[in-house]
Amino acid sequence: MAETLRMKIALLGATGQTGQYLINQALQQGHTVTAIVRNPGKLGVHHDNLKVVEADIFSADSLKTHFTGQDVVMSCLGFPASFFSGVTGYTLSMNSVISAMREARVNRIITMTSWYTEPNSGAQSSYLIRFLLIPMIRSVLANMHEMEKFLEKTEDINWTVVRPPGLKNLSASAQEFLTHEGYFVPTSSGNPAGSAVGRGDVARFMLSLLNSNAWIKKGVAITTK
């Protein structure tokens, strides 16, 4: 395997469950991580190559200082579903992030959303997912999709959207990834493949993109074999 280039990563959503797997793997791989968080006390990781900074993800001015000199922005940000009002966190934060990236002259971002962000993409999914799970998180999926549409119009930034299915709190495995440029990974029958992957594997896939141009300006659905 080729020697991976060591990168300077600005990480958003570092205190979240997937973000914590990503930090640990990135540090193991020799990358330098700047974890941009709202509450530094929530991050219990200490490492010579880790800097923890406080910033407002909804303010480009607050972010651009920490983006300066970075090679890539990685985001594991998540926002809770809401029945009573729409979710706006994904689009509002991405607006600030892209503005700050332009000012700091960083042009690579790797972010994560989910399977089924596109409203009709869940039609082939199981009864349970289609009629129980998707309606429960519809507000989240809708805002994720809006964010994806915003990135698609962003010509000067090399973005990649990673779409995992359900997430399990498991460390990275050595399993092979199945990928598909779309809103889920179909099996040979056309029906969706897996139902959940470990958060450690999502982090592993996101980090594998650092030295690859495979999914630039694309959304990729993933699962493990």
Image (cartoon, grey):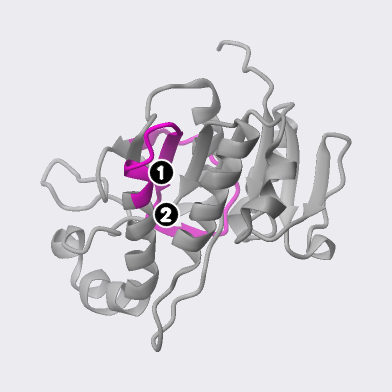
Residue span colored magenta: 150-178
Counting from the top left corner in percent of width and height, residue 102 is at 56, 37
Circle 2: residue type: Thr
Image height check: is 152 above or below 72?
Answer: below
Counting from the top left corner in percent of width and height, residue 9 is at 67, 35
Name the foreground residue: 174 vs 92: 92
Q: Is residue 59 visible?
A: yes
Give yes or no for residue 160 being in the magenta stretch.
yes
Report the residue at 28% width, 59% height from top.
116
Tag 1 residue: 161
Residue farthest along the bottom direction in this orientation: 84
Image height check: is 99 above or below 42?
Answer: above
Q: Label 2's element?
A: loop
Circle 1: residue type: Val
**Which image quarter is the N terminus in?**
top right
- Asked if disc 2 and disc 1 are in contact, CB closer than 8 Å, the reply is yes
Residue farthest along the left direction in this orientation: 189
Image height check: is 140 above or below 57?
Answer: below
Query: Which comes before the other along the chain, label 2 or label 1?
Result: 2
- Neighbour tally class for label 2: few under 14, some 14-19, many 20 plus, Cα within 10 Å: many
In the drawing, what numbered circle is on residue 121?
Answer: none
Q: Is residue 200 visible?
A: no
Give yes or no for residue 173 being in the magenta stretch.
yes
Counting from the top left corner in percent of width and height, residue 216 is at 39, 29
The answer to whether 209 appears left or right of 164 in the picture is right
Name the foreground residue: 71 vs 15: 71
Tag 2 residue: 113
